[in-house]
Amino acid sequence: MPNSTPPRSMRGLLGLALLLLSAAGATAQEKQPYARTGNGDFVIGPEYQIDPDLTDQGNPKGKLFEFSMPLAESEIFDGTDETLDPSKPVRTERKIWVYIPAAYVDGTEAPLLVMHDGPSNLELVRNALDNLTISEDPERRLPAFIAISVQNGGDDSKGSQRGLEYDTMSDRLARFVNDEVLPAVLEQESIREAYPNLKLTSDPWGRAAMGCSSGGAAALSMGWFRPDLFRRLITYSGTFVDQQDDDAAEEADFPLGAWEYHSSMKLIETSEKKPLRIFTHVAEFDLRPDDPEETYHNWVMANERTAAALAAKGYDYRYVFSRESRHCDGRVFQTTLADTLVWMWADYETAATR
């Protein structure tokens, strides 16, 4: 008897077609061929190549610093939360990487980009800063932001320290970064020796967050729950699914975790519009693309709906759907990240010139 199950590539296309016919797809803008600039919904792939702006072009280099923060000294994430699964290891300390571009002038208030799951794509961001802070094209020029890449607390998913930090629907991560990580950066002796007058902006429009998977959901949640602290948000393969710990106190308000952004509660559409600029992405073969809605764990469905909700609410957003690609696909980062950073900072003005 012949196999009646369509091949994986066909199933992915069929799944996408069904999504586009769903309520989410009905409110999203029609997807356009990929463009390097602009708001809206875009499709890229199946061919990918690294953007030259993300390669080492021999331009002046900034300085890279690394230090550690013991979890036990944290007032917010000390590694002993009662929701943690004892079988999932917790780091005793987390590493922090800080890249200060050559274009930064000591004593000025620097914008910043917080990167989750450090070191993550720090090398690509470093190259983007080296190349684009001095771009001759004003439309491609980046501000001299400081990249702060933060290691997660360990392991993954429900019951893990990483899950507690990234998948919880609260302001805890935003407070941790603002109240503990940023002051630690300013207090580091090695950084102070090189930049004795280093300043980080307190302007929320000068503060961005970026991540992939649960780190992407974390980036959105940082801005969603604390738009007074972070307003520029970059999410790749965002985990906008039900991955919040079942024992979390936040379950009372958000029983389906980050799934509530786009479905059931429709948090994005029913809440007052927030002052945020948001980039989202999902891959054609992202995690569990064939799962039915009732699992609350289909990454493609979740990101399609999130983009649709952002469009319906009139957010300043950009959404990229990448064909023939997978979860947190490195090829997608190599092709799109420079464009994403340029778009994210395109309207930035320093506090001094506002």
Image: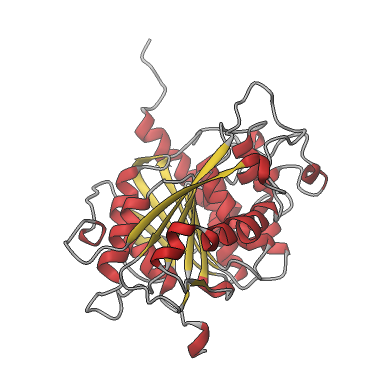
Q: Position of residue 35 (x, y in %)?
A: 31, 65
* Identity of the residue drawn at 60% across and 26% down: 89
Q: Position of residue 345 (x, y in %)?
A: 43, 72
Is 173 on the left-hand or right-hand side of 278?
A: right
Residue at the far left: name it: 58
Is 221 on the left-hand or right-hand side of 59?
A: right
Regarding residue 35, the answer to whether it shows in the image is no
Q: Quadrant of residue 222?
A: bottom right
Q: Position of residue 204 (x, y in %)?
A: 58, 72
In the rendered image, the vertical position of residue 69 relative to residue 245, given as above or below: below
Residue at the far right: name it: 252
Which residue is nearer to you in this view: 308 or 19? 308
* Identity of the residue drawn at 58% across and 69% down: 276
Is 156 on the left-hand or right-hand side of 125?
A: right
Which residue is nearer to you in this view: 3 or 31? 31
- Where does the N terminus fall, quadrant-wise? top left
Q: Quadrant of residue 255?
A: top right
Which residue is nearer to you in this view: 348 or 276? 348
Q: Quadrant of residue 229?
A: bottom right
* Identity of the residue drawn at 40% across and 41% down: 13
